[in-house]
Image (cartoon, grey):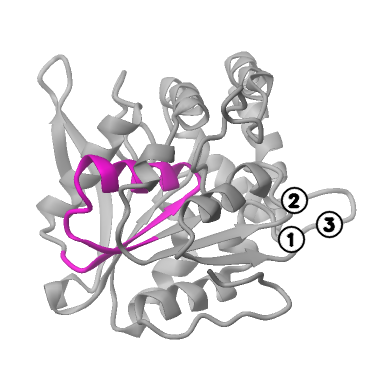
């Protein structure tokens, strides 16, 4: 297994981040894509993209956030400053250049914070997919956000019965209902297995981090090409509270809305997502059709 050291914990033990690196032998001769997973999954959520993107002359790296997947289950460090530093450890240790950061959901926050905290070092482009940016929590200065009660209930339910929460949340994640089955039960079972190996503490702390962190100032520090992708049927991270506001904050970004797509569009719209990411990384024209809105 491949690990990157991301500092040490309070006892002096190394904090290790698990990663996978596709096409590493070609090193920095290739454009590099770094995939940052969402909550409460691991890098394995990128299964389809990891299988396809490297076929197109790209180096592709994905890693497990601390507390999730095969990475160290630290007691703390789930704030975005620390998570952005972990991302820096990945880029620096692997000596990656000409990087396109792709942040899904919670991972979008890591992209935004990295770009401001580390001045976008090594990064050529960024993509926000179903991302939590710019600020999810509703307040006087953020009237389009989500009520705090929603996140409090999530934490309470996780603390009561994390397994039951994860199974219910998985259906919500993909828009599964009595009449709609965009993913199989086998896929939901796989996601549950991926999510349940995370630490309980990390699962709870990350809810507070992605719901309460304000990325509005971070977005102003992004000075590279940006792609924003969001599904307009996303009930997990509502587009009105996230994708639309991120596009408003980054008026020169390419903004694609996937008509009818839920939060987990990396599976339900996997072919289109891969095509759009490829076009963005390779400087090709991003197509717009009946399933997308204006390109900014």
- Label 1 crowd bin: few (<14), some (14–19), many (20+), radius 10 Å: some
Q: Is residue 183 visible?
A: yes
Q: Nearer the viewer, mark 1 or mark 2?
A: 2
Disc number for residue 182: 1
User: Which of the 4 image quarters holds residue 184?
Assistant: bottom right
Q: Are marks 3 and 2 in contact (CB under 8 Å)?
A: yes
Q: Secondary structure at mark 3?
A: loop
Give residue 180's mark: 3
Q: In terms of sequence position, does the residue under pointer 1 or pointer 2 come before the other?
A: 2
Q: Are marks 1 and 3 in contact (CB under 8 Å)?
A: yes
- The boundaries of the magenta stretch are 97-126
Q: Which quarter of the picture shows residue 144?
A: top right
Mark 1, secondary structure of its residue: loop
Residue located 59% across and 30% down the image: 142
Dividing the picture into quadrants, the one containing residue 21 is: bottom left
**Percent of width and height locating residue 180:** 83, 57
Q: Is residue 124 left or right of residue 79?
A: left
The answer to the question of whether label 1 and label 2 lie on touching residues, with beta carbons closer than 8 A, is yes
Residue 220, percent across and down?
36, 47
Q: Which residue has dot 2 on it?
A: 175
* Label 3: few (<14), some (14–19) or many (≥20) C-alpha neighbours in 10 Å: few
Residue shown at 10% from the left, 19% from the top: 12
Mark sitting earlier along the chain (3/2): 2
Label 1 and label 2: CA atoms lie apart by: 7 Å
Residue 262 in picture, x, y percent from top left:
69, 54
Judging depth in this view, the residue of 205 and 121 nearest the camera is: 121
Which element carries disc 2, helix, strand or loop? Answer: loop
Q: Taking 120 as reference, is 95 left or right?
A: left
Picture coordinates of residue 9 (x, y %)?
17, 21
Q: Is 100 in front, or is 217?
A: 217
**In the image, residue 38 above or below residue 196:** below
């Amino acid at each position: 297994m491949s690990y990157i050291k991301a500092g040490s914990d309070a006892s002096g033990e190394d904090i290790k981040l698990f990663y996978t690196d596709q096409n590493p032998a070609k090193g920095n001769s290739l454009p590099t894509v770094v995939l940052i997973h969402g909550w409460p999954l691991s890098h394995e959520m990128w299964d389809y993209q990891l299988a396809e993107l490297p076929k197109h002359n790209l180096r592709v790296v994905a890693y497990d956030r601390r507390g999730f997947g095969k990475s160290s289950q630290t007691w703390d460090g789930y704030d975005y400053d620390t998570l952005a530093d972990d991302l820096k450890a990945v880029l620096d240790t692997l000596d990656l250049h000409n990087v396109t950061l792709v942040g899904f959901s919670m991972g979008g926050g890591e992209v935004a914070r990295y770009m401001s905290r580390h001045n976008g070092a090594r990064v050529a482009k960024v993509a926000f997919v179903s991302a939590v940016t710019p600020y999810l929590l509703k307040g006087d200065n953020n009237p389009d956000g989500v009520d705090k009660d929603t996140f409090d209930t999530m934490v309470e339910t996780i603390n009561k019965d994390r397994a039951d929460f994860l199974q219910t949340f998985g259906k919500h994640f993909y828009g599964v209902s009595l009449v709609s089955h965009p993913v199989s039960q086998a896929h939901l079972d796989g996601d549950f297995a991926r999510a349940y190996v995370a630490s309980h503490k990390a699962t709870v702390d990350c809810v507070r981090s992605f719901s309460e962190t304000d990325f509005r100032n971070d977005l102003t520090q992004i000075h590279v090409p940006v792609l924003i992708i969001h599904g307009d049927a996303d009930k997990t991270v509502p587009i009105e509270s996230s994708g639309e506001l991120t596009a408003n904050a980054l008026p020169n970004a390419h903004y694609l809305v996937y008509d009818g797509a839920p939060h987990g569009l990396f599976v339900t719209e996997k072919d289109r997502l891969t095509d759009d990411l490829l076009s963005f990384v390779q400087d090709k024209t991003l197509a717009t059709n009946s399933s997308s809105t204006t390109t900014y």
